[in-house]
Image (cartoon, grey):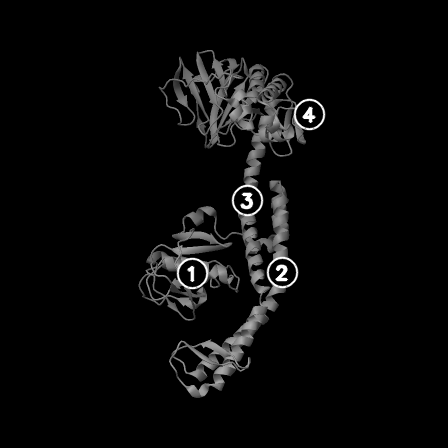
Amino acid sequence: MNFYELIYLKRELKNKLTGGKIEQAVSPHKNFLECFVVTEHDKHRLEFSSAPGNIALYLDTFRGAKKRNTINFFEAIYGVEITDVTIPETDRWLFLHFANGMKLHFRLFSNRANAFLSKDGIIQEVFKEYDEPGEEVPEPKELELFDPSGDVSKKSTKNQLTAFNLMLPRQNLEDLIEIHNLDDASVDEVEAFVEKMVREMKERPVYRLLETGETTLLSKELLPIETEREYDSVNDLILDRYKSYAHNQRLKQRKSSLVKSLKRRVKRLNSGLKNLYQADKSLDRAEKYEQWGHILMANAHLGDINAEEIEVDDLYNEGEKVTIPLEQDLDIAENAQRYYKKSKGAERSYEEAMNRIPEMEAEKEQAEKLLSQAEEIKNLWDFKDWEKEHDKELEPFRTQQSQSDEEKLPFHTLEVQGYPVWIGKSAKSNDELVQRAHKEDVWMHARGVPGSHLVIRMGNDKGMPPKEMLLEAASYAAFNSKARGAGLAPVIITKKKYVRKPKGSPPGAVVVDKEDVEMVSPKKPGV
């Protein structure tokens, strides 16, 4: 709430509440206080929200207080006449004055917004424990408006505006600066503009809810942002803003995890497709491996040379030599068979990529469509209807664990190139990580040394992440092991379905039935 709204709210409350009596003040839920006021001709419900980000004070339609699960406050003023409603000259407080000399204070700013009852300048009772009974009442600030300290010309335009009037509403200042080209204005022109704003808010206020969701007392001529709704009173403006904020927060909470999941999936699909579009490289590798196999078979008579590589005549480029890497524990013929097998594998990779591309493109198109629709929905009830309509399509994207559950996980969690990653904290943590992982998740561990288990969450995706992402995650697995100080370290990479824990084995111990190994440089996550 801003100071200029309080000017008009004070007038409305003074007209409606003076002479009335508070029958009951209760807190039906956290950060919320309801005061039930009865006057000679009417009944009112004065509501106060101290919730950070949604501080509000307003009158709502009267209804009786709940009799159960509520806490009563300020009983010393029950049945005592309200004699006045006031605000300070330059601060965001509002006071209800009572015939017995007590005063109910509402602090309408900061993360310490509060209501408390005082008498003779001493706090008697508090709503929130930000203030203490027995303390002196905090004094409102007395500010000098249009008398800035220091050289205003050295400040940014926004700071110039607030330097001339610290009570200006902040939410639309950047729009006003852009609309009225204030960045190019002189200090005197900025001061004149502030005076014009204040004059309009004090003399000709317009209670507008903007299409942006913000509120203003400025006319459309001064702030030409489209109006969603205009109100007859500032009370109705504040009430609607409060309820809209609460509504929007529920909408945000409901759709945030789903939108995040959809964005993550689109990012992963884009990354996967980028790699699949380069699948023709697999054909090049297949041809090269097949040629190396033929060349080695032509030299099979050399037998076992126990070397890391061999240089021989290139049968496919006359007069040139070719160097072929070897597995030292295999002879030449066995190395040839190994390359024939790698050639077949590269060919299969190409075929699989060609089959997978249309599927992934269709999945990406659907995920992008759902994401676009979700982001456009601005109403909670519309979002619920949309979820119901697309229930089956959205099922793969719904978060399996709530944020609070995620925070309780016994292992580290992070995101790597759009993929959720778990890293064990201890041997016991490693066991739980493996137990919770899905069979299609990717499991990693530094080979031959103690260390943390690492899992890349894949959901039910039977594929593998892009090679670049795998290597980055593998470097984290190496870092979280006894191989941390090595220049290069081998890391086992496999699907979790190939990892099992033998009965009776010690914490953290597993058996891997099928594995690939990558050499990586250990790297600390986040660096």
Which comes sooner in the sequence, label 3 or label 4?
4
Mark 1 — residue? 474
Q: Where is residue 478 in the image (x, y as percent from the top left)?
A: 38, 60
Mark 3 and mark 2: Cα distance apart in space: 28 Å
Q: Residue 221 carries which label?
A: 4
Identify which amino acid the numbered label 2 is placed on.
Glu
Judge whether 250 appears above or below 321 on screen.
Answer: above
The quadrant holding residue 221 is: top right
Secondary structure of residue under mark 3: helix
Query: Which circle's residue, 4 or 2, is located before the other in the chain?
Result: 4
- Report if residue 166 is visible in the image: no
Q: In x, y percent, where is residue 363?
A: 61, 59
Q: Where is residue 430 in the image (x, y as percent from the top left)?
A: 37, 58
Where does label 3 land, which residue?
254
Cα separation, mark 4 vs mark 2, equals 49 Å
Does the CB distance between marks 3 and 4 fall below 8 Å? no
Q: What element carries label 2?
A: helix
Say what amino acid the circle numbered 3 marks.
Answer: Arg
- Crowding near the residue tagged with mark 4, few <14, some 14–19, many ≥20 C-alpha atoms within 10 Å: few
Comparing 490 with 456, the one in front is 490
Q: Are marks 2 and 1 in contact (CB under 8 Å)?
A: no
Q: Which quadrant would the N terminus be assigned to in this image? A: top right
Three-letter code, disc 1 = Ala
Amino acid on which disc 4 is placed: Glu
Q: Residue at x 58, y 60 (%)?
A: 274
Residue at the outermost front position: 319
